[in-house]
Amino acid sequence: MITNRHILAIDFVIIVGTLISLFFVVGYVTPLVISPVNGYETTNSSVLFEFNNANLILLDDNPSFTSPQEIFAEDNLVINLKSGVYYWKVQGPLSSEVRKLTIVSGIALKVKSLGEDSYEVVNAGNNVLNVDIYENDELSGSVVLRVDEGKEVSGNKFVGGENEEN
């Protein structure tokens, strides 16, 4: 004969079993975010996103995600980003925590002599550059250099700055 004590014991076992199962299920479906770490700062515009148990990256310039860029992907994806502050999270069955990522603007211009008054200017930074070319203190031309791009130019003074249009 089943008594109230037996019913309470069975109910207790069912409740504890359900809670343990729920704990493991939630732990399994919660996205595991590996990188980049929260607060990550870099001058490298190529960022590796490593995560498990998710298939969507939400990337935005504000932590409220009012206009997020949605990137469907599995784990381990490299995304090229412009300089700026980004907030991101991944989503699967559940969402991860929000993380912050900063791409620091890096402006660098390398000049390599190729001969008399002939040079190669190379964008060694992480932004598109405008390079003004001077000959005897007079502006003689300008070029736009994408990241890692180089061009042969003639002149004796070169001034590079960030291209605001790209």
Image (cartoon, rainbow, N blue to C red):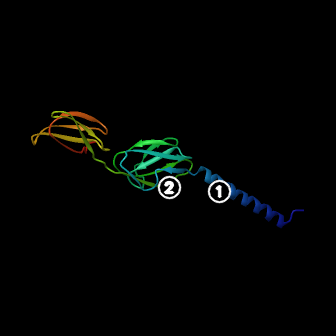
Kindly indicate the quadrant of the structure image that contains residue 140: top left
Kindly indicate the quadrant of the structure image that contains residue 134: top left
- Picture residue at 66% right of the left edge, 55% below the top: 22
Quadrant of the frame with the C terminus: top left
| Residue with the mark numbered 1 | 23
Residue 11 in the image: state x and y as whole percent.
Answer: 77, 61
Q: Image height check: is 16 above or below 92?
A: below
The local secondary structure at tag 1 comes to helix
Circle 1: residue type: Phe
Q: Measure the C-alpha gap from mark 2 to mark 1.
A: 18 Å
Q: Are marks 2 and 1 in contact (CB under 8 Å)?
A: no
Indicate left or right for 119 with 10 as reference.
left
Indicate left or right for 68 with 31 as reference.
left
User: Which residue of the protein is positioned furthest toward the bottom in this rendering?
Assistant: 5
Crowdedness near tag 2: few (<14), some (14–19) or many (≥20) residues, C-alpha within 10 Å: few
Residue 98 in the image: state x and y as whole percent.
Answer: 47, 55
- Picture residue at 50% right of the left edge, 41% below the top: 73
Residue 12 in the image: state x and y as whole percent.
Answer: 76, 63
| Residue with the mark numbered 2 | 97
User: Which residue of the protein is positioned furthest toward the right in this rendering?
Assistant: 1
